[in-house]
Amino acid sequence: MAMINDSMVTALNEQVRREFQAAQNYLAMGVHLDGKSLEHLAAFFYRQADEEREHAMKLVRYLLDLGHQPTIPAIELPPGEFEGIKDIVQASLTQEQAVTRAIHELVDGALTAKDHATYQFLLWFVDEQVEEEASFGKLLDIIDMSENVLQVEHYVRHMGAEGEGGGEAEA
Ligand SMILES: [Fe+2]
Ligand SMILES: [Fe+2]
């Protein structure tokens, strides 16, 4: 069994919390959009929420595999009010950037501790964050180029059909 130090266990549990928090935030955003009849944008955020939960469970599984009991954290209330689609996507990108910084700090910690197993495990998250930031950055570009939210909805519908942002086809 790979050795992993106590501060790394704490840091990984903290990342579990961040991923569940991201999942709840995206779920709240999805529900908000669903309530505005923007079903394809809503579906995009529901997929993001599912992905974040998978990220959390990946970390939970890793801790279990190493014989550490993960803690399932309490989650702060997600934001309930949103100004509009641009604010939602900008807040998402900001959240992803914060998660990227957290992941990089975890990687730094693993390198310092010569914790090769955790280092290797975290590289998947490093790659994933590049994709996550790119996907929200692209959506922000599309919003800036669009005349109204229906054009964004159309774009996201098409994006879903091509399998981006989660791979599940949208009819
Ligand atoms: Fe994540
Ligand atoms: Fe993410």
Image: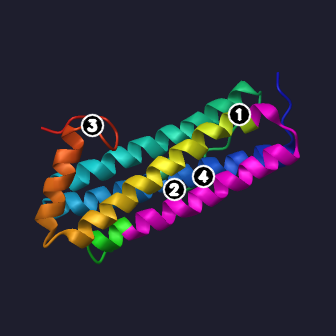
SS majority, magenta: helix
C-alpha span from label 2 to label 3: 25 Å
C-alpha span from label 1 to label 3: 28 Å
Magenta range: 90-118
Q: Which residue is mark 1?
A: 120
Horizontal placement of 113 versus 68: left or right? right
Q: From the viewer's perspective, is the residue at label 3 or at label 4 nearer? A: 3
Q: Which residue is mark 4?
A: 17
C-alpha span from label 3 to label 4: 28 Å
Q: From the viewer's perspective, is the residue at label 1 or at label 4 nearer? A: 1
Marks 1 and 2, the one that precedes in the sequence: 2
Q: Residue furthest bottom?
A: 83
Q: Is residue 76 above or below residue 1?
A: below
Marks 3 and 4, the one that precedes in the sequence: 4
Query: x and y percent of residue 42 in the render?
Result: 24, 54
Q: Which residue is mark 3?
A: 163
Please tell me whether mark 3 sits on a helix, a strand or a loop.
loop
Query: x and y percent of residue 117 in the render?
Result: 77, 31
Marks 2 and 3, the one that precedes in the sequence: 2
Q: Which residue is mark 2?
A: 21
Q: Are dots 2 and 3 in contact, CB under 8 Å?
A: no
